[in-house]
Amino acid sequence: MAGTNPKPRRDAMGTALAVLNKLASAPVLDRFNLRKPVEKGLYTATRTGFTAVGAATRQFAAAQKLAKPARLPSAGERGLFDITPDDEQKMIVETVSEFAAERLRPAAAEADADCATPADLLSTVTELGVTLVGVPESLGGLGTERSAVTGVLVAEAMAHGDMGLAVALLAPSAVSSALVLWGDETQQATYLPAFVGDDVPAAALAVQEPRPLFDPFALKTKAYRSGGGFVLEGVKSLVPRAAQAELFVVAADLDGRGPALFIVESDSEGLTVESEPAMGLRAAGMGKLHLDKVRVPETALLGEGKSAVYTECVRLSRIAWCALSLGTSQAVLDYVIPYVNERVAFGEPVSHRQGVAFKVADMGIELEGMRLLTYRAASRAEQGKPYAREAGLARRLCAEKGMQIGNDGVQLLGGHGFVKEHPVERWYRDLRAVGLVEGIVLV
């Protein structure tokens, strides 16, 4: 469904907050005894967020007709499991690692405080061609075969800079990957060209819902057939850059038969977004997506609504989250080792104490186990082999041990682990998301 309003709309949340901030500092408030009501409004808005219509979307339209959907072939069979990256992967990882160290790490603290991703980082990651890796060459991308392992390596390297920023920067790739994996020829021709150009749209894979013990296979968001299309109702939570996103892939229960994926443009009538700052991943600018009888055409259904498509989406997303946990856990370990070696207590470095040394060693051991399981799951996925068991094991280990590594990092820094002067407290908050969040990223 093409967008109906090509004129960009201003970010309602940001604009409203800016106006309230300016108003709160005006001396005229004291004259009319309005300071307390205005300050209360500012506090409430900052804490709960504003609700606004979705961002204006570009005119998505097919520039060419495709005879059939373009799919990437499975990677070649590997007789021996080897986690050594090839030359091309090494080059990609080196480039992304440099970007993460030089651009993401310095910007992370401010982005976390602002609950927003800096615009210059978004443009730079587009120049790096991150969204091109999973798109076939025939559609303007760089992909020649399934590249789940490469996706894992990219996510790991980026999360070493900052997980929240990595989530925001990788979110559009999840949508383009979903279109490549499960989109038909019309969907690919309509939406994929935007992801291989110079102006990649903000986009998000919205699976998570705002309730405890969320089960991605028991969705409260509903979709039912109506008038030759579908109507969607429900709420999605923890959607990265929700206020700026132009395109969503939304998970909803289809006619009570089970979950399916739908393509939803942000200017669809009945779609609104609400800011949702969370404990972690704050730099991703999380928001809620409200779907109030949102109508989409029949062509919005992704993968023909097959249950196997949705199941694969959940598994590939979980592998991607494992990759993010690897990068952030490695960042914790890399920060802790020099700290305990340089921190002197009672006349010697604290690393000379067995309790400290053994804990650091355990962090390294668990991290290598997480890495092996994640790489193995991704390797089997890209080869077209069954990988449900490997993805499940990786998810369980990375969720549990990643959070433990974050906690141990805070503990080993003592009081310094609790304050924002050191980044470990932020990494700990981000790592807690790995076992909770579904969707958003994909490999």
Image (cartoon, helix red, strand yellow):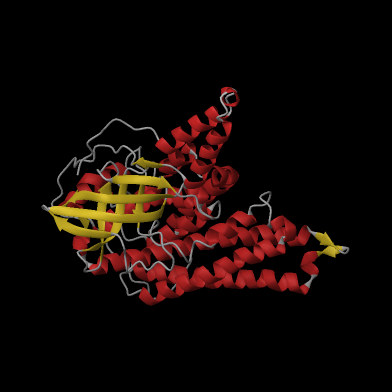
- How far across and down, in percent of the image, does residue 95 sit? 50, 48
Residue that extends furthest to the left in the rendered view of this protein: 228
Determine whether 59 is above or below 153 in the image: above
Determine whether 264 is above or below 405 in the image: above
- How far across and down, in percent of the image, does residue 113 sit? 57, 44
Which of the two residues, 376 or 290, is positioned nearer the viewer here? 290
Q: Quadrant of the C terminus?
A: bottom left
- How far across and down, in percent of the image, does residue 219 sit? 31, 65
Residue 29's image quarter? top right
Q: Is residue 125 visible?
A: yes
Q: How many numbered badges does the structure rendering display?
A: 0
Q: Quadrant of the N terminus?
A: top left
Residue 126's image quarter? top left
> What residue do we see at 67% from left, 52% from top?
422
Which of the two residues, 283 or 229, is positioned nearer the viewer here? 229
Which of the two residues, 420 or 327, is positioned nearer the viewer here? 420
> What residue do we see at 59% from left, 69% from top?
404
Q: Is residue 85 visible?
A: no
Residue that extends furthest to the front in the rendered view of this protein: 33
- How far across and down, in percent of the image, does residue 259 sit? 27, 65
Residue 389's image quarter? bottom left
Q: Is residue 262 left or right of residue 359?
A: left
